[in-house]
Image: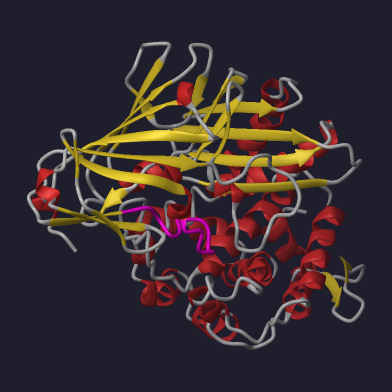
Amino acid sequence: MLNPTDLGSNYFYEVSLNDIKDDRLAVKLSVFGIKTEEAVFNFPRIVPGIYGAMDFGRNIVHFQAFSGNDTLPVERTGTNSWKIHMAYKINEIRYEVDDGWEVFGSGVQEGFYRSAESSFTKDKVFVINNNTLFGYFSGGEKWPVYVSFEKPADFFAATSLENRSKNPQKDDFFAKNYRDLVDNPILYTRPDTVNLHIGNTLVTVACYADSGRKLAAEIGRKIGPLMEHQRAYLGGTLPVDRYTFLFYHTSHSKPGEYTGDGLEHSASTLCLLNSQTDSSLLDRFVYGIASHEFFHVITPLTVHSEEIEDYDFLAPRMSQHLWLYEGMTEYTTMHMPIKEGLEPVEDFLLEIQRKALHMKQFDNSIPLTELSRAAMDRQDQYYNFYLKGALVCLCLDIRLRELSEGKYGTQELMRDLSRRYGPDKPFKDAELFDVITSMTFPEIRTFFRDYVEGSEPLPLEQFLSKAGVRFDAKRNTAALAPDATPQQLQLRKWWIGS
């Protein structure tokens, strides 16, 4: 790897959305001050938040490096990397980028996340994931990035990136480093936006619909109350000053059916939806994907391990804590509505039944820590984090409430972990279980050993019984026990507030 001091100190990118040709965007990168004989330029193989290799360099064509008007020797060393010879002469790189999908709809393949890709539709909409348009030098991952987009004057860029331009035909964005750039997608289209003030947070909802229907106001009416309840659930304050929801909707004519995809970021979520333009489907989508993705601001975006903090876009090390990143987030998504009084207990119990039923389709003998480390290779088992992972966190919540006599559960645990760590202070992967145990109770270490690090069957029936819920594993039914003891009723009240 190159020493960063031997390279330039900034990236200066230019793109014109007005000049799309053959469904490709042309990108120019100005480079100064490289002192080495060779330099390696890369696009990510994978990005944070997804666990399947995407190889974003596969859509890059006509890659060239220049010294003035002269081209420099370039060798493509793999799908995602180019070695530039005589790099000390370089002052410019040019290439073209194909989009990764045309219209979001059905037929999503395993391990392929459209929400991490880009899509270009001239004069209508550009979904920009910056990891597909812009690369980085090995050793230059922490350089500041400046990106300039020429655009139609009536297009609006919805993003949480800082925009330093006041020109209606040009946007100038700044990111503190490459990771920050990748962490902020952009939706370019004619404006359909609303701004919401949720406590200390400015929330922007920006939408595109191929039907031409304006959706932002309607979705904003769903997002606003949802986030108010999320704020209450998180202790009264949201952990970000600004947040942007980017919604891309395509229509089909099949009643009741929809395909959705979403990817969380530190200050935004990109949501893709293919459905009828039906308010009940939009409701379900907002309260499903949007709620889950926003809760990721807690983990892994605030609470995360060194593997995520020092992310290698070409060969990332996998953390063993996907049970926390995805399982806890999914549990929080299902727990918040019942704890905040937004849904009847029957709906909450139905969700437990659904997860317990679908969990049986997966290999539950694989410890969650082992599956986490092998997430890229075991895509066939990955969805179990949203099932078994969420139910493990449900049982952890009940156990914590039981041991603390109602004073402490997963809500308080995640708040305390956020205070202890935070966006810029990762935890050590191997130490997290012991840290949580030191913050809570000795018995919790046994819980992790048995059900997260180990392959002991999750005794869902036993844990739910503690809270006066009768679960029949064979029939896959869950119901409130009519003969619950006062102790069980008290624990249930501590746990779900009813």
Q: Which residue: 51% across, 19% down?
A: 156
User: Does residue 445 sit above or below 25 in this rendering?
Assistant: below
In which image quadrant can residue 161 be found? top left
Q: Is 329 on the left or on the right of 493, as rendered?
A: left
Magenta segment: 42-55
Q: Is 75 on the left or on the right of 380, as rendered?
A: left
Judged from this view, the residue extending furthest toward the front is 70
Q: Assess whether residue 313 is covered by the magenta stretch.
A: no
Pick the front one: 318 or 123: 123
Q: Position of residue 148 (x, y in %)?
A: 34, 26
- What is the magenta segment's predominant secondary structure? loop
How is the rendered protein coloured? secondary structure
Q: Position of residue 281 (x, y in %)?
A: 82, 39
Q: Which residue: 41% across, 60% down?
A: 79
In which image quadrant can residue 487 be found? bottom right
Q: Position of residue 27 (x, y in %)?
A: 37, 35
Q: Which residue: 52% across, 81% down?
A: 370
